[in-house]
């Protein structure tokens, strides 16, 4: 199971009931935080989420509403007793930016590792998630993120017998990977069928529509996409600021064949996003307005 919670859905500035950009993905007691705008800690507290399990922080870009909450968050991990390393992934220049921010967050109790995006083919693997950053189209270098939770195939006893795998190794190969026995090397593919469909979440904010988004959202169980403005007459403003309107996000969701779309990163002038949802739902009926604390448990399809 993969839990996804929107913890901040505002763009540019926080509002009374809307904190700046952030999203948390959690599986098996380990969490990935996407962006860390001002107020992320408060938003997580309000949503009942824990800080300490955050192993990885993915930064989309270096505008303040996406990264200004980072120093305080890193210090809170210290007060929570974090000692294991924390990895921050982001665009080129990340190391320099984080080093500068950490001038007000010194003496961390854990190792902080920065991993900078290096271009096409770059992936980062956690215990349960394969993280793929991809470039989007904003005023400065900006990344979207694809999160894949892969799923192994089913155990196939006939395949195991065909490969002459000793029965005592069947469970080992299913759960622990490769094994050596009596001078022979055994691998999981000798007892497991083809990989089954896993889970996919794609997250992107601060961008104009671009092919890389649909490519990385293809077949996603959840597509989280910015909708700075709801009304189509705001398109010139969205183009000027390199953001999106609801209908553009919905068109990407429809093209990518996703299961559901959550809109986020609203303009402060958009006080009631739900009132404009039809602009997206008319194109992609499974569109929903995100809000701070909106959460979902994504589960594998047991029929596959």
Image: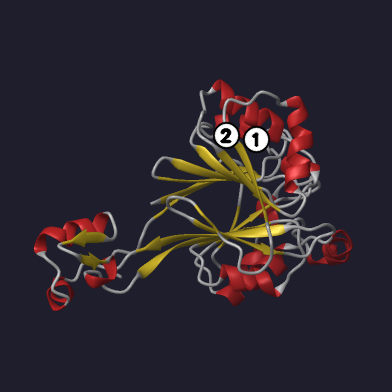
In percent of width and height, residue 30 lies at 45, 42
Q: Element type at marker 1?
A: helix
Out of 282 and 101, give the one closest to the viewer. 101
Kindly identify which numbered label has been placed on residue 131.
none
Residue 57 visible in this rendered orientation of the protein = yes
Kindly identify which numbered label has been placed on residue 44.
2
CB contact under 8 Å: marks 1 and 2: yes
In percent of width and height, residue 286 lies at 54, 65
Q: Residue at x 50, y 33 (%)?
A: 84
Q: Residue at x 66, y 23 (%)?
A: 107
Q: Which residue is mark 1?
A: 40
In percent of width and height, residue 240 lies at 89, 62
Say whether residue 183 is left or right of residue 147: left
Q: Can you tell which quarter of the image residue 165 is in? A: bottom left
Out of 119 and 46, give the one closest to the viewer. 119
Q: Residue at x 70, y 56 (%)?
A: 205
Q: Can you tell which quarter of the image residue 155 is in? A: bottom left
In percent of width and height, residue 126 lies at 48, 51
Q: Element type at marker 2?
A: helix
Look at the picture and state if 111 lies above or below 270: above
The crowd level at tag 2 (other Cα within 10 Å; few <14, some 14-19, many 20+) is many
The crowd level at tag 1 (other Cα within 10 Å; few <14, some 14-19, many 20+) is many
Residue 279 visible in this rendered orientation of the protein = no
* Total labels drawn: 2
Say whether residue 27 is left or right of residue 187: right
- Quarter occupied by the C terminus: bottom left
Q: CA distance from mark 1 to mark 2?
A: 6 Å
């Amino acid at each position: 199971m993969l839990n996804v919670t929107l913890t901040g859905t505002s763009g540019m500035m926080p509002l009374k009931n809307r904190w700046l950009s952030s999203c948390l993905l959690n599986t098996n007691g380990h969490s990935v935080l996407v962006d860390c705008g001002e107020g992320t800690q408060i938003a997580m507290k309000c949503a009942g989420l824990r800080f300490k399990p955050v192993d990885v922080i993915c930064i989309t870009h270096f505008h303040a509403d996406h990264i200004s909450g980072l120093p305080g968050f890193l210090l809170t991990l210290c007060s929570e007793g974090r000692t294991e390393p924390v990895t921050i992934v982001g665009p080129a220049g990340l190391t320099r930016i984080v080093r500068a921010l950490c001038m007000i967050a010194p003496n961390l109790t854990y190792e902080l590792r920065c991993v900078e995006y290096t271009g096409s083919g770059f992936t980062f693997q956690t215990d349960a998630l394969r993280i793929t950053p991809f470039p989007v189209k904003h005023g400065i270098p900006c990344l979207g993120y694809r999160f894949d939770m892969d799923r192994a195939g089913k155990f196939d006893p006939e395949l195991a017998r065909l490969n002459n795998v000793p029965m005592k190794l069947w469970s080992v190969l299913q759960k622990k990977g490769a094994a050596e026995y009596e001078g022979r090397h055994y691998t999981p593919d000798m007892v497991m069928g083809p990989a089954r469909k896993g889970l996919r979440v794609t997250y992107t904010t601060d961008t104009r529509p671009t092919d890389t988004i649909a490519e990385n959202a293809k077949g996603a169980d959840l597509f989280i996409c910015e909708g700075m403005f709801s009304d189509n007459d705001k398109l010139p403003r969205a183009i000027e600021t390199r953001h999106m309107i609801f209908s553009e996000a919905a068109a990407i969701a429809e093209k990518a064949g996703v299961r559901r779309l959550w809109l986020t990163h609203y303009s402060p002038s958009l006080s009631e996003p739900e009132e404009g949802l039809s602009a997206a739902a008319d194109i992609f009926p499974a569109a929903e307005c995100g809000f701070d604390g909106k959460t979902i448990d994504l589960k594998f399809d047991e029929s596959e």
